[in-house]
């Protein structure tokens, strides 16, 4: 009688497709979430900006690019996202404007910048696709880290600093830029509290107080205005009792601060903003439609002032000067699409929270900044990080609604 054949132990599938699937799972479940967390918090603890850039390239940009090659599911969502498509249109115009720019940077260096931002959109979309709740958990963890570092920074400033304003620590070295980073997290906390409340846990209130204290310590009026804009936008979209309470408390707090410390708002005047913008508009009038091109040389001169200024201190003004009226219209279209889409999907908590960060960044950028298309830096917290999370939240919401309709 023949012996029964021996069963060989199951061997792991070593086919190329199986290997690619395991690699993709590892990237989207392990590497990309860590990379995005580092992107969100790295400016707060990295020693230098080059270190922050390297971490982004290795843990966000490269994994996102590999995932786009290995998996197809993120591609249709990206290419059907109105926000991402608007970004592509704007970035294409910016790259075209290099043709008439007098920049001294290499073409390769400039072309990489919009690619990095596109890969940020892809990375956030891929993380959300792998686990719909992971983006939310990621933002919560980033807020906890930001609150912890912000509290320590505030304590050090109050006890040891000799400067009148909180400048920042580690890679952060400017009060306004420090307010940009912490203001992003404050906007998230404000919107989350209005949407969700405390849920018997006071962490959102504590986070708002800690981050609000950091913004006040920087004495950044743009940061304060951005927080107010996030509050008003969240209240407009949410229209609940918490929104009314928050608006009332914010109004009373503003009056109290203005009465007790009016110099916070008045001691620096308008910081030459009207003069800088007037000179920018004068230069724009010479080349209104096409502008001076991406990364064009800028040195603004103000009558009666011997100093020259390489910055219009307004992101929309920077876009207008470099990209002309055409570029500014594309920029306005990008934000218009983002805000209209957010209004239509305002019942989705994640959409509302992310859109509050978009509004906060938009307002903060009105009076500060020139780097609208750059490598990872503080201005990403005003523009591209909020927009990428909002685009992902909207895309995942639409996908979920499509599945619901199919099942019914």
Image: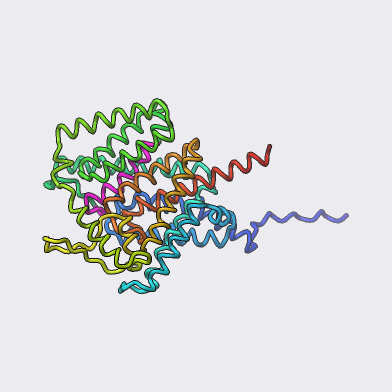
Place of residue 226 in the rendered image (x, y in percent of width and height, measured from the top left): 31, 43
Where is 390 relative to 408, above or below? below
**Residue at x-position 11% and y-position 60%:** 304
Front residue (pair 190, 252): 252
Place of residue 273 in the rendered image (x, y in percent of width and height, measured from the top left): 21, 53
Which residue is the extreme one toward the front? 285
- The quadrant where residue 249 appears: top left
Quadrant for the C terminus, please: top right
**Residue at x-position 48% and y-position 55%:** 84
Q: How is the image coloured?
A: rainbow
**Residue at x-position 42% and y-position 30%:** 239
Quadrant for the N terminus, please: bottom right
Front residue (pair 339, 76): 339
Q: Is residue 180 left or right of residue 88?
A: left
Q: Is residue 42 left or right of residue 126?
A: left
Where is 154 relative to 127, above or below? above
Q: Is residue 54 visible?
A: no
Q: Is residue 377 left or right of residue 304?
A: right
Where is 216 relative to 18, above or below? above
Place of residue 11 in the rendered image (x, y in percent of width and height, measured from the top left): 66, 57
Residue 33 among magenta residues:
no
- The quadrant where residue 171 appears: bottom left
Helix, strand or loop for the magenta stretch, by majority? helix
- The quadrant where residue 190 appears: top left
Place of residue 111 in the rendered image (x, y in percent of width and height, measured from the top left): 41, 68
Q: Which residues are magenta?
A: 170-191
Residue 184 among magenta residues:
yes
**Residue at x-position 47% and y-position 44%:** 340
Front residue (pair 305, 135): 305
How many tags in the picture?
A: 0
Q: Is residue 283 visible?
A: yes
Front residue (pair 151, 352): 352
């Amino acid at each position: 009688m023949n012996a029964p054949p021996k069963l060989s132990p199951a061997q792991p599938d070593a086919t190329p497709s199986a290997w690619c699937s395991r690699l993709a799972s590892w990237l989207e479940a392990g590497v990309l979430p860590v990379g995005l967390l580092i992107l969100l918090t790295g400016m707060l603890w990295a020693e230098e900006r080059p270190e922050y850039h390297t971490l982004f390239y290795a843990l966000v940009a490269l994994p996102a690019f590999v995932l786009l090659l290995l998996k197809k599911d993120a591609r249709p969502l990206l290419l059907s996202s109105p926000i991402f498509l608007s970004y592509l249109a704007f970035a294409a115009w910016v790259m075209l404007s290099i043709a008439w720019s007098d920049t001294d940077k290499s073409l390769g260096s400039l072309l990489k910048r919009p690619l990095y931002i596109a890969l940020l959109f892809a990375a956030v979309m891929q993380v959300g696709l792998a686990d719909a709740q992971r983006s939310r958990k990621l933002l919560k963890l980033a807020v906890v880290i930001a609150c912890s570092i912000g509290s320590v920074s505030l304590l050090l400033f109050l006890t040891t600093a000799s400067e009148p304003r909180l400048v920042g620590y580690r890679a952060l070295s400017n009060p306004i830029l420090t307010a940009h980073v912490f203001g992003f997290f404050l906007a998230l906390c404000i919107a989350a509290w209005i949407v969700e409340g405390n849920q018997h846990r006071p962490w959102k209130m504590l986070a708002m107080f800690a981050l609000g204290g950091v913004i006040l310590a920087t004495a950044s009026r743009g940061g304060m205005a951005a927080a107010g804009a996030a509050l008003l936008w969240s209240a407009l979209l949410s229209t609940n009792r918490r929104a009314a309470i928050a608006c009332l408390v914010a109004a009373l707090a503003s009056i109290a601060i203005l009465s007790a410390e009016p110099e916070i708002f008045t001691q620096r005047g308008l910081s030459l903003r009207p003069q800088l913008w007037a000179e920018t508009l004068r230069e724009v009038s010479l080349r209104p439609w096409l502008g001076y091109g991406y990364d064009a040389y800028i040195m603004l001169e103000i009558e009666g002032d011997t100093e020259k200024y390489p910055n219009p201190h307004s992101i929309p003004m920077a876009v207008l000067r470099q990209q002309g009226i055409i570029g500014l219209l594309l920029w306005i279209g990008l934000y218009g699409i983002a805000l209209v889409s957010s209004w239509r999907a305002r019942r989705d908590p994640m959409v509302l929270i992310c859109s509050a960060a978009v509004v906060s960044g938009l307002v903060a950028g009105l009076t500060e900044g020139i780097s609208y298309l750059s490598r990872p830096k503080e201005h990403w917290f005003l523009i591209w990080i909020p927009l990428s999370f909002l685009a992902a939240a909207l895309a995942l919401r639409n996908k979920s609604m499509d599945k619901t309709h199919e099942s019914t």
